[in-house]
Image: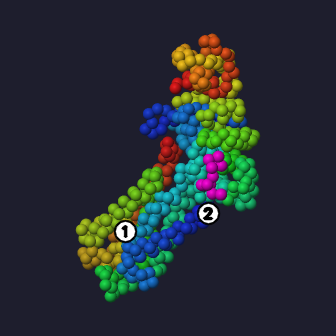
Amino acid sequence: MLKRSFRRSGYLLFFAVVVLVVATYVWYPSPLIVPWEETGFVDSTEDVFALLLAVFCSFLLPNRYEIELSLTCGYPTSRLAFSRLLPVLVDTLAGAFLTLALYRYTSYNGMNKPHIPIVIPEHMKAYLAVSFLVTALFFTALFFFVRVLVRNCYLSVACCLFLERLFSAMGKSVQQGVADITRCRFDPFISVYMISDKLPNALAEQYTELSGLAHVWTYNRILFFVLALLLFGAAYLVLQREHLHKGFGE
Amino acid sequence: MIEIKALTKVYPRGKKKALDSVSLTIPQGIFGLIGRNGAGKTTLMRIVATVMDATGGEIYIDGSPLKDCKDVFRSSLGYLPQSTKLMPRLNIVEFLDYVCIMKGMKEKAERQEKIASVIETVGLVGEEKKRLGKYSGGMLRRAGIAQAIIGDPKVLIIDEPTTGLDPEERLYFLNLLSRIAMERTIIFSTHITADIEHLCKNICILEQGEVKYLGEKEAFVSGIEGKLWTYTGTREDEEQLRRDTVVTSVAYVDGAAEIRYVSNEPIFDAKPATPTLEDAYIHALGGVKR
């Protein structure tokens, strides 16, 4: 079933790559041939990535008929949901990393538009990758949960969009120094703080090195990893309860 | 054999019981479940099909409680729900292959053989390449029955399969059901009495979540034998008959009302009529109200 799900959802990878590239290209007008660091891969991609997951989770999760079919065929609902979710996560992540290869993490100077040069030190890249994975897992779980709660796929996309914007706004307010710096502990898009140049001045002074930011980052990532697991569990329980006790659409 | 004992279902926030202490025994063969829309047929079928839990009561499969043998029961179950949206982007072969995988058939050759056989049974040969989204209502029902019977299940639960079908497709579907009924238990729900007139030996009539009748169809119909009358009269006659008897049908032909009603004695100059399942069913529900 998993092999079949991957085969049938192969177009997601293509779709994810196209969306990620186009989004970065359109939102941050930079030529793809000579990508600039200020396209802000980590920042923009995490945003776009979250939206992609929302759309994929909302439209690709098994519907009522498929769940009933799997139940009456004796196929566990959990395996069905997992076989649908995994390609969503893997294909989107793969898309993100494929587009990542298009960018060089070097600052580009001499631009005639306002930009913040970003330099990502070599030793931070592994942390960034882990950070990115946790963000992906958290948003997949969150959007899966929303999709299970809100039975209409379009409505769930709208809900996910709202949540993504909310988190994004929260992150920006911290970056701009409007909100308290300690709030970045609860920002799912914490990867962006790891790029020191994007930190608000106060935070940058406080955590000039990754080691300084490490405890905040660790706390945040563990928190969102646990939250992701809880959301997956809650979504599955809701799915079982809604289905077996109430019946979708009854 | 499926035994249902005191089955009750109350939906969350539901004001009344969807099923109220329903008890019935379903033997081998085609078992007809009749009732108005909202009578509780679909709820009952969904609970038996293990896609919904009951609030109370118990179901026994060959003497064992269903809750203890759910997985075994599911392996011998085929279910065709009321709304068969299926998967519009797949063709019938891809769809049935998906169902086969879910039913645990791992060998590709075995799956292909079963799929070809089922497609032939349901008369969809030549339609293999067409996407399910392009199928007509009747073809979709046939695709639905194909997914239900693949793997040769011993129990088939089919929920209002003929709703919305044209007469030809409906007849084709009913014939198909009678062909596949051999050595199977088929629970077949409908609100169209003509569907089960020639198919089922045993029937159950559900009304507002309660069993109104359970038993053999012939016995049910013979219950009004000698009491069914037909009379052609005026609108005033119809009004009087509605007050004094149980009217099972009224048809206006050339301005005159052809009325069939149930009464111990004939009223007006009525002639005796041969009862049908529909007459007995409408009588059981208290007659034509509108």
Name the subunit of mark 1: A
Where residue B92 sits, quadrant-wise, is: bottom right
* Amino acid found under the numbered disc labelled 2: Arg
- Crowding at mark 1 (Cα within 10 Å: few <14, some 14-19, many 20+): many
Numbered mark located on residue A129 in the image: none
Q: Residue at x 42, y 69 (%)?
A: A48
Q: Which residues are magenta?
A: B130-140
Where residue B26 sits, quadrant-wise, is: top right
Which residue occupies the extreme bottom position in the image? A110
Of the pair A174 and A217, the residue shown nearer to us: A174
Name the subunit of mark 2: A
Of the pair A117 and A138, the residue shown nearer to us: A117
Report helix, strand or loop for mark 1. Answer: loop
Residue on which disc 1 sits: A189
Above-or-below relation of A165 to A67: below
Of the pair A81 and B177, the residue shown nearer to us: B177
Q: Residue at x 69, y 21 (%)?
A: B274
Left or right placement of residue A63 versus residue B31 in this view? left
| N-term mark: 2 or 1 | 2
Q: Position of residue B87 (x, y in %)?
A: 59, 55
Residue on which disc 2 sits: A4
Is B131 a magenta residue?
A: yes
Q: Main secondary structure of the magenta part?
A: helix
